[in-house]
Amino acid sequence: MSINLAQLKQQQIEYANRIILRDDNHFSTPTLIGGTDVGFEEGGQITRAAIVVLSFPNLTLVEYQIAKMPTTLPYIPGYLSFREYPALLAAWQKIEHKPQLLLVDGQGVAHPRKLGIASHLGLLLDIPTIGVAKKKLYGQYQPLPDERLAQEPLFDKTGIEQIGSVLRSKVKCNPLFISAGHRVSQLSALNWVKACLKGYRLPEPTRFADAVASNKPLLQKLLHNFKNNN
């Protein structure tokens, strides 16, 4: 597999210049919030992308879709979005109830070239997106106290520009790294993630998507509840 990293890097830089880091003027409280996650099968040969759609504010499952396809790129730090977005776009095409806001498992602009998967996907779909990452990829922050909803700004390597927020969503759990993806401000990104927490480390949209993408036991519980409610 031939990979031109210089070309991918240039594309990231070009896309990053098109990212909008402010709230849409006409954005209103969404009735549907989506979540995305990506898993891999057959030793990484198959990409399994999941998108879930939840009602807001009660955060119950409305719809979910899965798309599988051959993996087109190996894992390369800093270029993960190119590995994940093709299957996510395929899953998005299947969604009937399109959400007005999408929480994406991964980075937004908290990325060395300001184009993590949340920003990349948001730009391609032209919708507001938020990156909700389980680990830090880039940036620096002050230590958080071990209390629920403790938070600190995440800065770039200069320590001047805020590129996201670090949030301890649950006591005795590692923090989440939240950053605006596209068409949303950093403050709103943090507030929307908080609004989607229900006592777990992950906000409900990406928690549900993680269960679907990785075919976890939670998926069967979600499907059982979904069938009972419909």
Image (cartoon, rainbow, N blue to C red):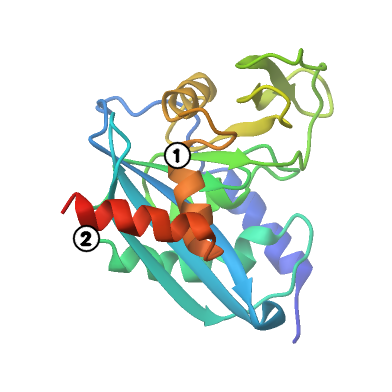
- Res 46 seen here: yes
Residue that mark 1 sits on = 204
Q: Is residue 65 placed above or below 17 in the rendered structure?
A: below
Rendered residue at 47%/20% (across/down): 191
Tell me which amino acid carries mark 1: Glu
Q: Position of residue 195 (x, y in %)?
A: 42, 24
Q: Which-is-in-front pick, marks 1 and 2?
A: 1
Residue that mark 2 sits on = 96
* Front residue of 128 and 38: 38
Q: Quadrant of residue 102?
A: top left
Q: Is residue 225 left or right of residue 42?
A: left
Q: Position of residue 72 (x, y in %)?
A: 63, 79
What secondary structure is found at the residue carrying circle 2? Answer: loop
Q: Is residue 212 left or right of residue 13?
A: left
Quadrant in the picture for the N terminus = bottom right
Tell me which label, 1 or 2, sits earlier in the chain. Answer: 2
Quadrant in the picture for the C terminus = bottom left
